Image: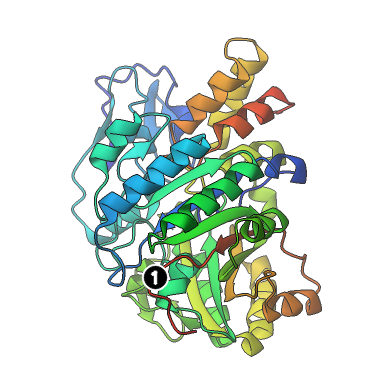
Amino acid sequence: MVRINRELCTGCENCLPYCTVEAISIKEGRAFIDPSLCTECYVCVRNDICPVGAIEKTPIEDFIHRFQHVISDPTETTAETGVPGRGTEEAKTNDVTGRYKKGEVGVCIDMGRPGVGVYLRDVEKVAMAVAAAGLILEGPEETPLAQLMENIKTGKIRSDLPNVRFLSIIIEGKCPIGVLPKVLQALKEVEDKIDTVFSLGLATVVDENGYSPVLDVIKELNLPEPVRGKVNVGLGRPLAAI
Amino acid sequence: MTHSLHRSGDMESLRGDYVWLMYQAKGINDTNIKEKAEEFIAVAEAVGSENWGDVKSGPKVILTVEEIKKRVTNQSRLRGVFTRKEQLVEFLRKIKEKNLGLSVIISGLLKETIEACKEAGLKPHTINFSLGVWGKKELLPKEDILAITTMCGHHMISPRLVEKIADQVKKGKLSPEEGGRLLALFCPCGIFNQVRAAKLLAGKITS
C-alpha cells in the first residue's frame, strides 16, 4: 500500500496533480492519501514524483488490497489469467483462440473508464443487469472480476466488497448476436443508476469490409455508429475454427 | 483489456493516431516470443513508430531500443503508435511478409484502419467496436483534456497533470513537444502518442 512519510513530507503539493483519482490532498500542512479513494495504481511511487521521497510503499498483506493493486497497475499480471491488467485477450487473439465464433458477440464493459474510477457496488448493478438480459459472464480463469463474484451466472459480487474502489475494472461476457438487443437495452436502463461511467466495446468476427450484423443491431437501437475500433488483422497462427 | 480502444478527440486529431499491438495467445502460440518480438521491433523502428514498448519493460520514450530488447521475454506483448496511415500500411505489409504467426491488432478510426488492411493485402478478422462512454458523463473532464488522458488507456495520466503541463506550455516554460514527451513518460505500455499530444497542447486546453 502507499503512504506518506509525514516526517519527510514538506507539504510542497507537487504530488497532487499526479494522482489518477485525486486521492492525495493536504492535511495539516502535509500530504495525505485517502484510503477510501486510493486504488493502489502506484503512479505516485512508480514515477518517483516526490522530490524528498516521502511517498512510500508498504507491504500489501490482505487479498483485496493486493487485488486492487494488480487490477489498477497495468505493469502487474493477474496470476489466474496470466494476462497483465484487468481483462481477457478478447478480440486481440480471436484469430487463434476462436473466443468469439460467427454469430456471437463479446461485450466488454470497462467500468470506471475513462479515469473516473468505480466502486464494486456499481459494478454489481451493471453485471447483474447484463447477466439477467442474457450475457454469459466470463469465468474466474478468464477475467479477474469473476474472482470477486459469488455467483458468476447472476453477476452478484461478494457482499463484503461493495465499497472497494478500482481505477477501472472490466465486466466481460459473450452472447449470441440475437441476444445483444436485450443486453444493450439493459445497459441503457442501468446507466442512469450508477455513480460512474463505463466505456463499451463489442467484439465480433467481421467480413473483409469490417461488417458484422452487430452493426445492424446498433443501428436498430438508434445508438451512434461506431467510428473507432480495434481490428485484429488475422495474422495469428494456427487459425482457429470460427 | 481495451486500453487502446476508447481514445477520445475530434476526427481530425484522431486521424493522426494509430495504435499497433503484438499478441501471443496464452497456451497456443506463446513460445519463442523473444525472437519474434525483435522482428516486430525492427519493423516498428524501420517504419518510424513514434512510441512503442512493452508494459513489463517500459516505453521507448524512457528506454533505448537496446534496453527494451534486453528486457523482452516470452511474456512480452509489444504495443506502439503511429501518426500517419502510410506508416500503418507499411508496418502491416512488412509484418505480413515476415509471417511470424502472432496476432496483430491495429486500433484507430475504422474507416482508416480497414482501408489500411486492404492496402496491405489483409482482411480484418475480428473487430472490437467502441460504443463510447455511457453513464454519468458529467463526471468526465473536458473533451480537450480527455483527448490526451485517453491516449494512456490505463489512465496513468491524470486530468490535473495534463492541466499542469498545458499551463506550463501556455506560459512558455515548456514547448508543446516537451510537454507531450513528459506526459508520455507516465504511460508504461508505449501507446501514448506524444506527437498528437504536442499538437493538442499547442491548441487551446482550458483548465
Dividing the picture into quadrants, the one containing residue A213 is: bottom right
Confirm whether residue A195 shows in the render: no
Give the SS element for disc 1. Answer: loop
B43 is higher (above) or lower (below) than B107? above
Q: Position of residue A104 (x, y in %)?
A: 56, 84
Residue B76 image offset from top left, x and y in percent: 31, 51
Q: Look at the picture and state if B58 lies above or below B154.
A: above
Is residue B121 in view from this perspective? yes
Choose between B42 and A63: the one closer to the eye.
B42
Q: Position of residue A31 (x, y in %)?
A: 38, 27
For residue B70, side relative to residue A160 (left or right): left
Where is mark 1, residue-wise?
A237
What's the residue at 53%, 53% (across, down)? B92
Residue appearing at x 39%, y 70% in the figure: A237
Q: Residue at x 69, y 83 (%)?
A: A181
Which quadrant of the structure image shows residue A79? bottom left
Side (left or right) of A174 relative to B78: right
Q: Chain of mark 1?
A: A
